[in-house]
């Protein structure tokens, strides 16, 4: 088994990463790391090794527990050719399996849709180049070939993929626009959460423009210069305007729809022919309904 570490998983401990990725016990993973049956870049490392982007983790399939199955789940596909797919992910759908979750994901749906998907990120993440949170809706790029995957991964790493999000945040932001420059790393208190910190962190930049001011809420367009885990959610909480309905980083919970964050736009150069392509998708009905409630309150 071979796993190429993405930028999103940088600075995660090797044993923690594999425990979550393979749904194995941490003690079992640690044993195999110490035995040298798990290597990173062909080197034997310690269990606490901090991963770096493009590290190559290799091991025999003794602990590969993918069992990923094809599932006939409807997909909202905006574009497809022999190299890539652009899909509009619904809020509530997990992008790929992990932590015991083996079904109902975008990866399961993609496997049913086509047998041609890149395998660079392993058998449990077919075609997955990047991801958005479970409860974030919107556009995702999927690779059907390894060549396309490598080019797109590099483009993400170099911040050449243009992305725009719509967010409904708590409170009224008085500035018409702004730039949040604050490094993001994993929380020392809860490693499933991210936070603004100087320790083991990476540069993170979010630009925002106010689209509409509502009753104790603000509708924003956010443009990412970097792509850190939970970046918009963390940055908005950091400036005291957390995304509404965000149960992890905020307190204003309206219902169980999930955070009001939508990946509305993606623009990129086609990984094979170089042609610039761009796509935009509308807000989901639930998001619009909540937005209208704020407008009418």
Image (tube, rainbow, N blue to C red):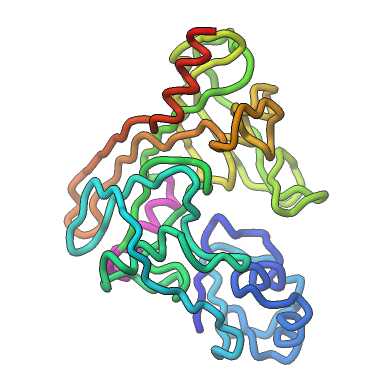
In the image: residue 167, left or right of residue 243? left
Taking 234 as reference, is 100 above or below it? below
Q: Nearer the viewer, residue 246 or 197?
A: 246
In the image: residue 1, left or right of residue 273? right
- Residue 64: give x, y in percent of width and height: 56, 83
Quadrant of the image for the C terminus? top right
Report the magenta stretch's main SS: helix
- Residue 222: give x, y in percent of width and height: 47, 28
Q: Nearer the viewer, residue 197 or 59?
A: 59
Taking 129 as reference, is 20 above or below it? below
Residue 181 visible, this orientation = no
Number of labelled discs?
Answer: 0
- Residue 147: give x, y in percent of width and height: 29, 68
Give the residue drawn at x 43%, y 50%: 158
- Residue 22: give x, y in percent of width and height: 60, 75
Q: Nearer the viewer, residue 296 or 274?
A: 296
Please say whether residue 226 is one of the residues in the magenta stretch.
no
Taking 233 as reference, is 145 above or below it? below
Give the residue drawn at x 44%, y 32%: 165
- The residue stretch that appears in magenta: 144-159
Please say whether residue 156 is one of the residues in the magenta stretch.
yes
Residue that sits furthest to the right in the current view: 189
Give the residue drawn at x 56%, y 80%: 65
């Amino acid at each position: 088994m071979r796993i190429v570490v993405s930028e999103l998983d940088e600075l995660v401990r090797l044993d923690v990463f594999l425990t979550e990725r393979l749904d194995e016990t941490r003690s079992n993973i640690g044993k195999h790391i110490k035995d040298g049956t798990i290597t990173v870049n062909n080197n034997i490392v310690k269990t606490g090794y901090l991963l770096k982007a493009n590290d190559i983790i290799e091991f025999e399939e003794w602990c590969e527990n993918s069992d990923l199955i094809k599932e006939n789940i409807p997909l909202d596909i905006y574009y497809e050719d022999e190299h890539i797919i652009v899909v509009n992910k619904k809020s509530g759908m997990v992008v790929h399996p992990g932590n015991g979750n083996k079904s109902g994901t975008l990866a399961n749906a993609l496997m049913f849709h086509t047998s041609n998907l890149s395998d660079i990120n392993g058998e449990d993440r077919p075609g997955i180049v990047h991801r958005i949170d479970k409860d974030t809706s919107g556009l995702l790029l999927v690779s059907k070939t390894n060549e396309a995957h490598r080019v797109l991964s590099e483009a993400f790493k170099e911040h050449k993929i243009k992305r725009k999000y719509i967010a409904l945040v708590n409170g009224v932001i008085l500035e018409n626009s702004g730039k949040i420059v604050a490094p993001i790393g994993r929380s020392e208190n809860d490693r499933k959460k991210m936070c603004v910190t100087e320790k083991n962190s990476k540069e993170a930049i979010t630009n925002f423009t106010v689209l509409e001011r509502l009753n104790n809420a603000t509708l924003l367009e956010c443009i990412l210069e970097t792509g850190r885990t939970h970046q918009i959610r963390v940055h908005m909480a950091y400036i005291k305007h957390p995304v509404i309905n965000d149960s992890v980083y905020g307190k204003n919970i309206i219902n169980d729809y999930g955070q009001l964050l939508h990946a509305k736009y993606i623009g990129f150069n086609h990984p094979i022919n170089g042609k610039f392509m761009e796509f935009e998708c509308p807000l989901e009905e639930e998001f619009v309904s909540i937005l209208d409630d704020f407008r009418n309150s």
